[in-house]
Amino acid sequence: MSNLADLPGVPIEFKRNAREALDDGQLRRNFRGAMDFLMAKRTAQFPDADELERLRAFGNRVRARALSKLPDLLERLEANLTRNGVKVHWAETVEEANAIVHSIVQAHEAKNLIKGKSMVSEEMEMNHFLGERGVDCLESDMGEFIVQLREEKPSHIIMPAIHLNAGQVASLFHDKLEVDYTEDVDRLIQIGRETLRRKFFEADIGVSGVNFAIAETGTLLLVENEGNGRMSTTVPPVHIAVTGIEKVVENLRDVVPLLSLLTRSATGQPITTYVNMISSPRKADELDGPREVHLVLLDNGRSQAFADGALRQTLNCIRCGACMNHCPVYTRIGGHAYGTVYPGPIGKIVTPHMLGLEKTRDLPTASSMCGACGEVCPVKIPIPALLRRLREEAVRAPDEGPHHMRGQGAKYSAKERMIWKAWKAVNTSPGLYRVARFAGTRLRGLMPSNIGPWTEHHAPPKPAARSLHELARDHLGDE
Amino acid sequence: MSHQPAAAPNATRVAPPLQAPRSYPAKPSDVFLFGTCVLDLFFPDAGMDAIRLLEREGIKVHFPQAQSCCGQPAYTSGYTDEAREVARAQLALFAGEWPVVVPSGSCAGMFRHHYFELFKDEPETLRQVESLAERTFELAEFLLEVCRVKLADTGAPVKVALHTSCSARREMNTHVHGRALLAQLQGVERLDHDHESECCGFGGAFSVRMPDISGAMVKDKTAALKGSGAAEVVSADCGCLLNINGAFEKQGESLRGEHLASFLLRRTGGK
Amino acid sequence: MSAKERILAKLRGSLEGTTAVADDYDEALVTVPWRYAPDKRLDRLREVLEAVHGETRLTTSADWPALVLAALAERGIGELLVSPATAHGQQFAGYLALNGGSLRLKAYDRPVEEWKDELFFHTPASLTGTLGGIAATGSLIVWPTPQEPRLMSLVPPLHIALLKASEVFDNLFEAMHAQGWAGGLPTNALLVSGPSKTADIQQTLAYGAHGPKELLVLILQDA
């Protein structure tokens, strides 16, 4: 991402990023291998197609129910968490969320934060924000730790360092941690473990995300395999959880289908090593756990998606990453090319609400609409239909009401609108269509050998000498 | 529930079964053919072969000359109003009782699924949409499930790869029907290809708006088709054929995808 | 207006005229496919747990202390973190007194802040009880207590857990329901399904990422 693209409203240079990624053979191989691996793992977890379909429908209903009473559930969540001793904060923007975190940091004169994996904290660019204010944020998830050492962003929401192979991590550790070069993954992980272990108990504050916030019991549920999430939420004296307002579910039992869908869809596991349910800070007689627990509920454009019945389905997402694992576009360009925190199909439908359509104008277009994402989505988000809807919002005239999205009309072009109006005229008028067809077939010899982007990868298309209309009329007569 | 070992990375993902299996009518005396715009201009012979296959089943085929496009190009580009008007023109042409046979899966999917979205605010029109959706069949589906064809292969033994359009496979189950028809041909051995269920990269306007990514996808697809060991490539979706054949030609390959209708007719002595 | 009021007002405005989606919870779907005959339940739990490098041993309420001792000896571990305030802690201490050896028992008897360094760097193994297990996913139900705090099952490289066979449930839904979780969850409730692991480097699985490198589950068949 260039500095320019960091400015609000300046479009992410998606096409340029994509071209660079496509030219990187190592990256292409790393992603192809990783996506094949994750697809096969998921497939093995769902041997019964009928169970899968019924569970997806169930997951969809559970999420739809939660969203259908979202404001009530958020209030209930807050009431129950407050009763349990957890402090709840609300933020409309990432700036507000960062300010809340910073005020907690200041109240404790904290210098070191240790972080479990949290995509919402990436959304907030919390590390950068606090770093500028002299607070050190260290990522403790192995993948996030690697990415942070490389001064990069995660390339996948579940496996942040999936764009790298062991050799690249070996070089990184050798350079940055001054250890002997080794490509032995067990050894590399032990190096990470040893480096981070001391950091856990030095940290003043632990930060985490939330997978499900349970209104009924006032509980924050986190899933993970490494144990860094438990460390971050248990060892430091203060725990700050950050999450989007859509993550709430109504009842504890609602997490049963969602948890099963999440871990099986994400990494092909029946369950993660740890399911960590946090309901309160350390009680008087308890010997560990943070003495303060905070929850920051972040909107950041979610309420815009929520306002429209169709777009609201975007908020069903449980962040499993299956859509990117199965996406032929993501597989080829990787996560960084999107230039957004959430890459892949879900990123294309959620990010426009966070950043506006001007900035994300190319994202909805970057899909062949093959439908793989919608097919695997565990909560049945109709991703292709939502991509199409975003395309519609992007080409509507900026001043045309009603307004559903920030940046409506980001791809509006009077010229393109005229072309489609002409296309409509041709395809609704048999006379015009006949002329166009005639021109297409009879002038086919004049088809230029270079017709823009198409001929970069294809021979120019050659219309037939006579159209089906003509052949059919000869054969069947005029109808 | 048993835990099977992970499938091989290259295994073909198959779309989940459609929610409610379709019930099929008895073979009709008359059908409409909706030719589709890409086929009209680039693969008219495949359209004629579809007509001949239907006629061989004793069905009278009607081809309304005023037909044009299903509206999909504008629809997927976000020009919903323009798509709706083009769709409306087709709706009027294909009214009545006869089934509508479409030799291109994604266009059939447009009739069967997406017109509901286009006309969601027009209750009157929705009745026509519903009638059209119920009567729309992709060609392979129609031959297999309505005509219940029994194909007698007259060709020499051959290995073929079948490419199915993604949206058609997911909306219309075309992979199931295409495979079943090919399986009837005694001399034809269908070979799986690498990442068979992955998109060829066409996606209509996607192929010109995002040529780099689309180009990388079709490069992989053509390599997979070629690498399958198949001597012939068959598909029932003209958009994919345009993409795959254009790429093969650009690469200097002799392999070309053939429309399923043409392949079936040729193998069964129809031409 | 506060951020909270503004967010809630927007959400409420968007829901105007809509009705809440009914709760048609499909209990059968999350239970029926995940049920096991009583004589297969433990097999299932062991199979799934062992698939992720959890070790399991079948034993009895009388014999398990010997297995703990053997497991520690096998690994050359001379210290065990165990609570003297629990029944199993007392049983183990009693066994140790009779069967001797040089094993030193250590208690988590003060706030973590007072012995962090020792816990993190000089505590090679821990022994805890569990509230039960879940066969479908090979999980242990662990609700930390003042006697067995949260870090006991996380920080030491070897975690030994006692599981009573009678407390193994078929699936999460049934465990939750039988134990009445919705009526009140503790400060921290955990499902533990194997030793800590990661596949963050080139999808290669490695155990002992941040938590225990080894999880040994002793299943008490008569309890």
Image (tube, coloured by chain):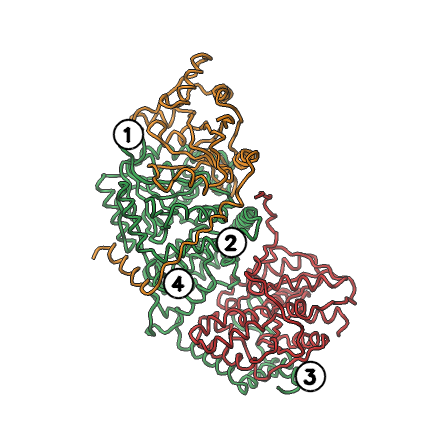
Which of the two labelled residues, at mark 1 and mark 4, occupies the earlier sequence position? 1
Q: Does the CB distance between marks 4 and 3 fall below 8 Å?
A: no
Question: Which residue is disc 4 drawn over?
Answer: A311
Q: Which amino acid does label 4 sit on?
A: Leu
Which label is found at residue A475?
A: 3
**In what element is the residue under mark 4?**
helix
Give the camera-side residue of B60 and A122. B60
| Discs 2 and 1 share one subunit | yes
Residue C158 seen: no
Measured Cα–Cα span from mark 3 to mark 1: 90 Å
Question: Which residue is disc 1 drawn over?
Answer: A285
Q: What residue type is labelled 2?
A: Arg
Measured Cα–Cα span from mark 2 to mark 4: 23 Å
Give the camera-side residue of C2 and A217. A217
- Write down which chain is painted red: B
**In what element is the residue under mark 1?**
loop
What is chain A's hue in the picture? Answer: green
Identify the residue at image location x=28%, y=43%.
Answer: A294
| Discs 2 and 4 share one subunit | yes
Which of the two labelled residues, at mark 2 and mark 4, occupies the earlier sequence position? 2
Q: What residue type is labelled 3?
A: His
Q: Which amino acid does label 1 sit on?
A: Asp
| Discs 3 and 1 share one subunit | yes
**In what element is the residue under mark 3?**
helix
